Image (tube, rainbow, N blue to C red):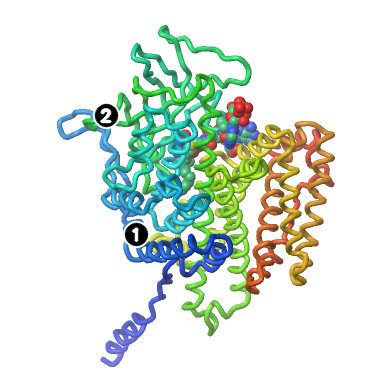
Amino acid sequence: ALEDLEIPLARREAETLFQEQPETGNPYLEDALLRSYLKTHLPPKVLEEVNQDLERFGNRLLTKIKHLGWECELNPPVFRQYDAWGRRVDHIVTCSAWRRMKEIAAEEGLIAEAYERRYSNWSRVHQAVKLYLFSSFSGGFGCPLAMTDGAAKVIESLGIPGSLKNPFDHLTSRDPKKFWTSGQWMTERRGGSDVANGTETVARKQPDGTYRLYGFKWFTSAADSDVALTLARVADTEGRVKQWPHGFSNLSLFFLKVRDEEGKLNSIQVQRLKDKLGTRQMATAELWLDGAKAELISAEGRGVASISNMLNITRIHNVIAAVASMRRMISLSREYACRRVAFGKLLKDHPLHMQTIARMEVQTRGAFLLLMEIVRLLGLAETNMASEQDQLLLRLLTPVAKLYTGKQASAVVVEAMESFGGQGYMEDTGLPVIIRDSLVLSIWEGTTNILSLDVLRSLTKSQGQVMAVFFSTVQKKLELASSTAKLEPAVKQMRDAVSGLAQFMQAAGSRGAETMELAARDFSYTLARIYAGALLIEHAARPDASAADISAAQRWCNQELCPVARALENSSYEAKEVLMDSALVYEG
Ligand code: UCC
Ligand code: FAD
């Protein structure tokens, strides 16, 4: 009888030993680097208002939006092809929380903020920071917002033509009833990187001047969106596709509404929804365009160049999502370390565990400052306050940051998962969602290699000028820090890396395009590490910098800052290595 009693007692005792869930607070108030960045850069009046807005928004995220985000994860979109009576409806059914996210995005001005420009050049920073805070709680809604921002940017850069005035107002509206989102349909089956050669969709001109599109779009995210920008080849009335001279990709850019006034699809059929590893809260569809009515919005044959305005914005949103996912995982991880005990003490009191999280923190800080630098430059460009140098730098740093932070996010979130032990691997903690959703960041909006080649494109386009701007900007930031004794070793490491990069540029210049193509990835990583290092040093050189700011700069600069220098020494970019790469990959 005594034994019988002991079992329930033991169980009762065990039931009090649940693992505690990490609870984080207002994400704005808990983000020391974000707050110190804003304090350093925003004019006082702007800071006062932005600070209030972000604190309020942080509370809203914590108390309302977070739960909606989780609902989106639990209720992913479903595809209903037929109604009960056998009629084809192709309905993508989204959950109420997803639809509520759209309303919240409008209410918070998550797109509007950037186009109203009430804080002039600082509006972009304000918008980006809100999106950054929103990202990890948004249940994937950051994706349609990225493309909406991109579409608004394209329309604005076209001077908001009369026919697009109404769509522009919808895309940038704060009214939840009026707010529209946009898709970006570029990828077809034959290729998502090589869009110019991969696009089979044709556009036939109609007597009223509009076009009808015929083709198959292989990946279309946020397929429940109201409108889309897409690419097609213009054909004549016989269906023959025009040939364009060199410099024209054959593709043109189109704007279309996904549904008509009655809610009927615009001669579009949904083939199916993609069965994705992550971003499952958001519908990515395969679409047949079967005569979809569309408006040509670029010069004929200039589709790729015209949609690049969208790409550069969505790539910045990708950086936002990458930094946000790292920040979220670290917030949870450091909080967990204050609750979980191992070997008789809290995880936070195990130096090796803290070192592991601190390394992630350093990566995240570098990525965060890179993000802020890009949106600062974008804000200047959009308010006619950017110098030519600023514009060149923005063009260069956008792909650099996208490719670098996409990879960082994958590494950091996986490392952070381990910091929860087995719990990190459990679905219902929500942690695997962050990991799955981060892994796509290096694929969509251009893969790492494609973005590395885009970095080279920006060099070619500026005839090398952009690198002169890069070097002088980094030098200036280092000079500002030269009187801070504690930063001396970091500044020295940076100067060595900068001269390694300069030597590489000189050597590569005499070797031709093949060397640069092989070096493109290492080169882009070099730019990312050196520029982020300069930003960390600049931030650490402020009079009110914290010890952590200084340490972050020192530690960042302790990593290999200039991978191209070593690779050049090892002859990694020589033609014989190309053959050896293939031999290695295909042996056996
Ligand atoms: O993946 C997608 C959506 C995912 C869901 C949304 C996620 C949102 C973010 C996350 C937040 C949570 S949409 C699909 C994305 N697809 C890509 O990114 C395509 C990847 N491929 C490329 O990026 C290629 O580099 C291409 C297609 C852009 C270009 O290939 P080409 O044919 O070799 O292009 P060219 O001939 O070099 O360039 C054509 C023109 C040139 O201008 P001109 O003729 O004046 O010299 C280029 O300078 O386009 C210009 N151009 C650019 N300009 C090309 N890229 C750019 C650029 N990035 N910025 C400015
Ligand atoms: P490929 O172009 O076939 O590339 C395969 C591999 O080859 C990649 O690793 C690439 O880096 C490498 N490669 C290709 N060319 C080169 C080269 N010249 N040098 C070196 N390496 C090279 N697209 C849209 O248009 N709209 C969307 O809404 C959308 N949503 C998406 C959602 C999800 C979840 C995913 C996963 C993708 C989505 N995409 C969308 C598609 C995405 O943009 C493409 O998958 C991506 O651009 C890569 O194209 P691809 O899949 O055709 O790969």
Q: Is residue 422 above or below residue 143?
A: below
Q: Ligand 1, what quadrant?
A: top right
Image coords of residue 518 (percent x, y)? 73, 37
Assign the C terminus to one quadrant of the image: top right
Instruction: Please identify the residue farthest to the front as the structure is shown.
Output: 45
Q: Callout 2 environment at 10 Å: few (<14), some (14 to 19), or many (20+)?
A: few
Report the disc number at residue 502: none
Which secondary structure, mark 2?
loop
Q: Which residue in the structure is indicated by mark 2? A: 260
Q: Callout 2, which amino acid?
A: Asp
Image coords of residue 380 (percent x, y)? 57, 47
Instruction: Please identify the residue farthest to the bottom as the structure is shown.
Output: 2
Left or right of residue 577: residue 24: left
Does any atom of ligand 2 lie closer than 8 Å to the CB of label 2? no
Which secondary structure, mark 1?
helix
Assign the N terminus to one quadrant of the image: bottom left
Q: Is residue 42 above or below residue 2?
A: above
Q: Which residue in the structure is indicated by mark 1? A: 65
Q: Is residue 31 above or below residue 451?
A: below
Q: Callout 1, which amino acid?
A: Ile
Q: Residue at x 54, y 34 (%)?
A: 308
